[in-house]
Image (cartoon, rainbow, N blue to C red):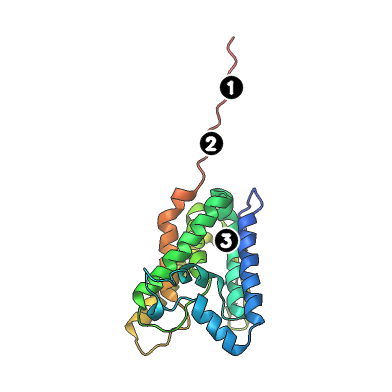
Amino acid sequence: MIPLKDTAKSESFPIINWILILLNGFVFIIELRLGNNETEAFFLKYGLVPSQTNLTGANTYTFVTSMFLHGGWGHIISNMWMLYIFGDNVEDRMGSFRYLVFYLLCGIIASLTHFALYQDSAVPAMGASGAISGVMAAYMFLFPRSLILSFVPVFFLPLFLPIPAVIYIGLWFIVQFLSGTLHLMSSSITAGIAFWAHIGGFLGGLILYKMFVKKKRRKYKKHLLS
């Protein structure tokens, strides 16, 4: 299921969401200008390499920098598209600064989850999807009845279905969990996707989102005494 748009409308301009999208795009442009050897070195330096990372070491910055790296056009386009669809509404409910902190925390939790489960891995983990997973968790609970217009390819028939956010994101999480569990059980499978980073980011967002949502101001009616 490929999301095309949602029906939830934000009341404010999502400045932080756009900055995040542009920042990811800027870093990707830097990647494109590097040669093959330089790109590999860049990923090893700024990506999260569990086997070369120590929680008290000098390269702990990779828990943050890794979420701004992407491995190709498909990777960055899919991630930024998901952030574009779901991020603006979450920022609207949290406020720009709180949303930024929430996004970064979800990304760090995603990185820590991947690090904890794959400490022997020498493969750089990178991408914004862990942080975006946290944003999706917040969206699912803040806008459960919002409809996600989705492209669903069925054989040769393109279907466009409006799917409630709670169902769309809920099914997405189930797929991530089943895929991540399968990978942990099957050591012969080479991971191309950091499923447990997605799961960790989602659960982090689920736990944290209420702390970052702006409290609704109570409206008091003025009464005239006669």
For badge 3, the amino acid type reads Phe
Mark 2 = which residue? 217
Q: Would residue 115 be found to the left or right of residue 124 on screen?
A: left
Inter-mark Cα distance, 3 to 2: 24 Å
Position above or below: 117 against 148: below
Q: Which mark is residue 86?
A: 3
Q: Residues within 10 Å of mark 3 (few under 14, many from 20)?
A: many
Q: Quadrant of the N terminus?
A: bottom right
SS label for mark 3:
helix
Mark 3 vs mark 2: which is more N-terminal? 3
Q: Quadrant of the C terminus?
A: top right
Position above or below: 124 against 133: below
Between 63 and 191, the residue placed more toward the observer is: 63
For badge 2, the amino acid type reads Arg
Inter-mark Cα distance, 3 to 1: 37 Å
Q: Which mark is residue 222?
A: 1
Q: Would residue 146 be found to the left or right of residue 171 on screen?
A: right
Mark 3 vs mark 1: which is more N-terminal? 3
